[in-house]
Image: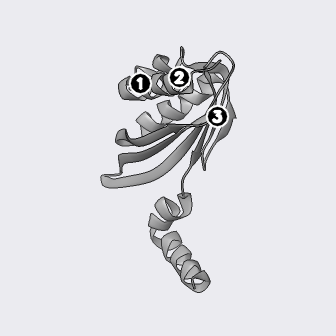
Amino acid sequence: MIDGRRNLDAYLAAYDVMGPDRLDVFDPVCDPDVRFVDPFNDLRGLERFKDVYRHMYETLEDPRFTIHDSAVGEKAGYIRWHFDFGLRGRAMTIDGMSEVAFGPDGKVVAHIDHWDAGAQVYGRVPVLGAAIGLVRRKLAV
């Protein structure tokens, strides 16, 4: 039987120590065919999973995750997080949740992020943000 709490804690511990040169911390806790999904990506494989974080470290300034809460359900773990980073000298924050599924061996087989890219990224782009704001106002009650 899978110990979801232990597996989720081991996965979260990898985030505590990961860095641009420390992405190997995911090797013992992720399945080689792990699936990663966020508003920009839907990919499979541990190396592609680590490519997401390589890209993050290459393109963002001082990226860091803060875990606010986690829970374990019958088939998955859930993480509520806060992501701070800089982009071209501008401080930014994204709040989201991740759903983490475990395989029979307890390794992560899927990491699916849930967060609002429209409000938290696209809405901050000057011209695009104004257009999104207009649409939101038109659709609001």
Q: Are marks 3 and 1 in contact (CB under 8 Å)?
A: no
For marks 2 and 3 on the same chain, the one whose residue lies earlier in the sequence: 2
Where residue 81 appears, x then y in whole percent? 43, 45
Q: CA distance from mark 2 to mark 3?
A: 13 Å
Q: 7 and 124: which one is in front?
A: 7
Closer to the camera, 37 or 121? 37
Residue 130 vertical position relative to residue 6 in the rendered view, above or below: below
Give the percent coordinates (x, y) of residue 51. Answer: 55, 29
Of tags 2 and 1, which is closer to the observer? 2
What type is the residue that disc 3 sits on? Glu
Three-letter amino acid code of the residue under disc 2: Asn
Mark 3 or mark 1: whose residue is earlier in sequence: 1
Q: Residue at x 32, y 55 (%)?
A: 90
Q: Quadrant of residue 72?
A: top right
Image coords of residue 67 (percent x, y): 39, 40
* Image location of residue 63, percent across then percent down: 37, 40
Q: Which residue is mark 2?
A: 7
Q: Which residue is mark 1?
A: 13
- Tell me the mark number nearer the camera, choosing from 3 and 1: 3
- Give the CA distance from mark 2 to mark 1: 10 Å
Residue type, numbered disc 1: Ala
